[in-house]
Image (cartoon, rainbow, N blue to C red):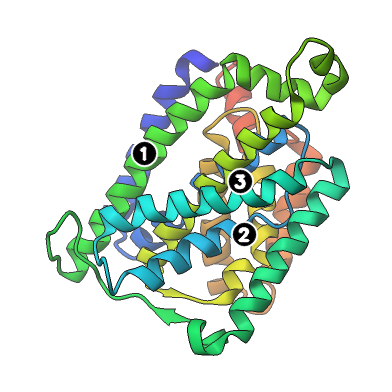
Amino acid sequence: MRKIEPLLAILLAGAMIAAAIAAPWLRFVLTIALAKGIAVMGILLLLRAGQVSFGHALYIAFGAYTVAFLAPRFGDAMILLPLAAVGAGALGLVIGLFVTRYRQIFFGMLNLAMSMVFYSLLEKLYAITKGSDGIRVEIMPVAGQALDRITYEWTIFGIALGLAFVLGLLLRLYLASPMGEALAGIKTRETRLEFMGVPARGVLLSAYVMSAVLGGIGGALIAMTSRHVTPLLAYWTSSGELVFIAILGGAGGVLGPFLGAAGYELVRVYAAASFADAWQMILGAVLLLVILFAPGGLWGMAARAIGGRGR
């Protein structure tokens, strides 16, 4: 399955581009899906260690607000993206030094608590964050080039797609490396890792920081695409979306987060348009069906469809 994963990635990217051309309004939806897919890759890293973060929207919100705060001063997407990534990584390091001491439900709930503290600060510090009204992000230059709205949207879509490819490749290489294998060992035999001289907490901390960086990048792309950031980005329901997408897409490969994100966003858009008062129920039904009949997620379904085995 690993051998054809790059081919499937190319096919998925081609399908997204074709959909964005055929239906221009989907360009926004698919860019958001790519941004969330990048963030969910961070959830995938933690799942490999048997840990689930119920507060990872913290890093999406941090990346988004980094763009919103710094855009008037720096005003270039190619500068703001690295700043959001580095800032989220630094925050992830500080929080990770504390939360990686814990496992299972304690790990998940501590992340949730951190996220809700950040959400409360964004809500209450109105003079700085504009509270629940949020901050508007204007169309910004990209690599020094001023763009009109349509060109800007296509450019951000292309950047998101390119980052998805590059970061997905790097994550794939990481998971196949000794560090990635040690990460999987935390889930099954953490004590044995320690006996072998591998610091399990250090391995988990490095993965946690990487997941924070991915969340920051995803949040920056969301801010540049939606051009409006609010505290709801850090709310617990946003973290729940990331876990939902991770389960829907499947943790068997790096394509899982993007399959899950695209499926989630498309189902939500069409369900909300057709059943405005019941779209949450439809999303819940979809997740329930995936858990019952396709526990490997959309990635697992794709693996079975081509006769392979997602790993």
Q: What residue type is labelled 2?
A: Ala
Label 1 close to label 2 by CB (< 8 Å): no
Q: Nearer the viewer, residue 290 or 54?
A: 54
Query: Alpha-carbon distance for marks 1 and 2?
Result: 25 Å
Mark found first going from the N terminus, 1 or 2: 1
Q: What residue type is labelled 1?
A: Ala
Query: Alpha-carbon distance for marks 2 and 3?
Result: 16 Å
Is residue 13 at all visible to an observer of this figure? yes
Q: In which quarter of the image is the C terminus?
A: top right
Mark found first going from the N terminus, 2 or 3: 2
Q: Which of marks 3 and 1 is in front?
A: 3
Q: Nearer the viewer, mark 1 or mark 2?
A: 2
Residue drawn at (41%, 23%) of the image: 6
Q: Dot 1: what SS?
A: helix
Crowding at dot 2, Cα within 10 Å, few <14 / some 14-19 / many 20+, comes out as many
Rendered view: 201 above or below 109: above
Crowding at dot 1, Cα within 10 Å, few <14 / some 14-19 / many 20+, comes out as some
Residue 84 percent location from the top left of the image = 43, 56
Residue to which mark 2 is pinned: 57
Residue drawn at (70%, 53%) of the image: 286
Rendered view: 89 above or below 147: above
Q: Nearer the viewer, residue 253 or 8?
A: 253
Crowding at dot 3, Cα within 10 Å, few <14 / some 14-19 / many 20+, comes out as some
Residue 203 percent location from the top left of the image = 67, 28
Residue 252 percent location from the top left of the image = 64, 28
Residue drawn at (45%, 49%) of the image: 86
Residue to which mark 3 is pinned: 93
